[in-house]
Amino acid sequence: MKGLPPALKRKKRYIAFELIGERNVDGKEFITTLWKTMLSLFGEIYSAHSGIWLEYFDGRRGILRCHRESLDKVKVALTLISRVGDVDIIPKILGVSGTIKKCKGKYLEVLKDASTSDGL
């Protein structure tokens, strides 16, 4: 069976985010909380068509994939999360990109080299 041509495929966006909290968060708990927030805000049909997928997560920082049409609503749901499991968090969206490579390089790799002592 032949796949869809590129013109008919839904475009994706990658959201780089950071969770500020007292300790690291489990990835499964985080994505479950995000799905519950999406369901309560936008309902089952829209949540199912948003295409949310956790591409990368290390406990503090991560990358979410979603469809381009639902980008704004996924960002709203992400910022409304205040607790994952038993950890209080503050989500911070670092940026949005069209490719995962650019998202990692521009938003996540820069934070590894950052130093809090000199403010850079």
Image (tube, rainbow, N blue to C red):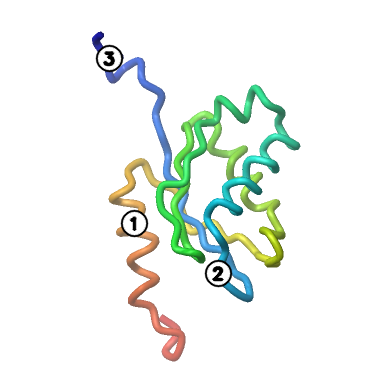
Label located before the other in sequence (1 or 2) = 2
Vertical relation: 10 (above or below) 91: above
Residue labelled with disc 3: 3
Q: Nearer the viewer, mark 1 or mark 3?
A: 3
Question: Most extreme residue toward the top, as rendered?
Answer: 1
Residue labelled with disc 2: 24
Label located before the other in sequence (2 or 3) = 3
Residue type at numbered disc 1: Lys
| Mark 3 crowdedness (10 Å alpha carbons): few <14, some 14-19, many ≥20 | few
Tag 3, which secondary structure? Answer: loop
| Mark 2 crowdedness (10 Å alpha carbons): few <14, some 14-19, many ≥20 | some
Residue 42 percent location from the top left of the image: 70, 31
Residue 6 percent location from the top left of the image: 28, 20
Q: Image quadrant for the N terminus?
A: top left
Q: Image quadrant for the C terminus?
A: bottom left
Q: Residue at x 71, y 65 (%)?
A: 86
Residue labelled with disc 1: 104
Residue type at numbered disc 3: Gly
